Each structure stands twice: as structure tokens, then as C-alpha cells.
Image (cartoon, rainbow, N blue to C red):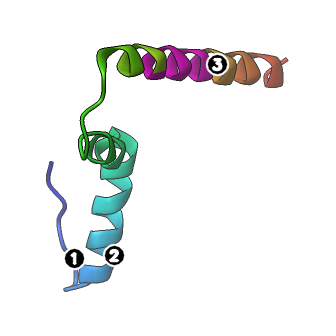
Amino acid sequence: MEIQVRDNDINYAVKKLKRKLQQDGMFRELRNRRSYEKPSERKRRKQREAERRLRKKLRKMNANR
């Protein structure tokens, strides 16, 4: 990942970097890796995330109608 600094505007470059990391899910992954997650908890979390993605997809489909 590469962020270019233009006109010595470091604050803008940092803001862009944070936005890209957020979109990639890096912050979420770091938070999850801070402590051990049992396999059963991981399975439950992944199921919840899949349900959330499905609900979001359905909302978008209904909004486009």
C-alpha cells in the first residue's frame, strides 16, 4: 500500500492512509488479534459477520427499487 504526500501535506496523507486501512479491515483485525479467540467464538463471529453482510446487501437491493 502506498500513499503519496503532495505539497508536504502530511495530515492529508495520514488521513488517506487511515481511511484505506479502515476499508481493508486492518483495524478490526488488529483489535481481534489482541487476545486469543476460541474456535467456537471465531465461528460465531464469522457467522454474525456473514449475516450482517447479507442484510446490508438486501438493504442495498431494496433501496435501488
Q: Position of residue 52 (x, y in %)?
A: 60, 23
Q: Position of residue 19 (x, y in %)?
A: 38, 56
Q: Is residue 30 left or right of residue 58?
A: left
Q: Position of residue 8 (x, y in %)?
A: 19, 86
Location of mark 3 (residue): 57
Magenta extent: 45-53
Residues under numbered marks 1 and 2 in contact, where contact means CB atoms less than 8 Å apart: yes
Disc 2 marks which amino acid? Tyr
Residues under numbered marks 3 and 2 in contact, where contact means CB atoms less than 8 Å apart: no
Q: Residue at x 40, y 21 (%)?
A: 41
Location of mark 1 (residue): 6
The secondary structure type at the circle numbered 1 is: loop
Spatial CA distance of label 1 from label 2 is 9 Å
Q: Residue at x 32, y 47 (%)?
A: 31
Spatial CA distance of label 3 from label 2 is 31 Å
Residue 63: mark in rendering: none
Upstream in the sequence, badge 1 or badge 2?
Answer: 1
The quarter in which the C terminus is drawn is top right
Determine which quarter of the picture holds residue 36.
top left
Instruction: Indicate whether residue 51 is drawn in magenta.
Output: yes
**Disc nearest the viewer among 1 and 2:** 2
Upstream in the sequence, badge 3 or badge 1?
Answer: 1
Label 2 environment density (alpha carbons within 10 Å; few <14, some 14–19, many ≥20): few
Between residues 30 and 41, which one lies in front from this camera angle?
A: 41
Location of mark 2 (residue): 12
Spatial CA distance of label 3 from label 1 is 36 Å
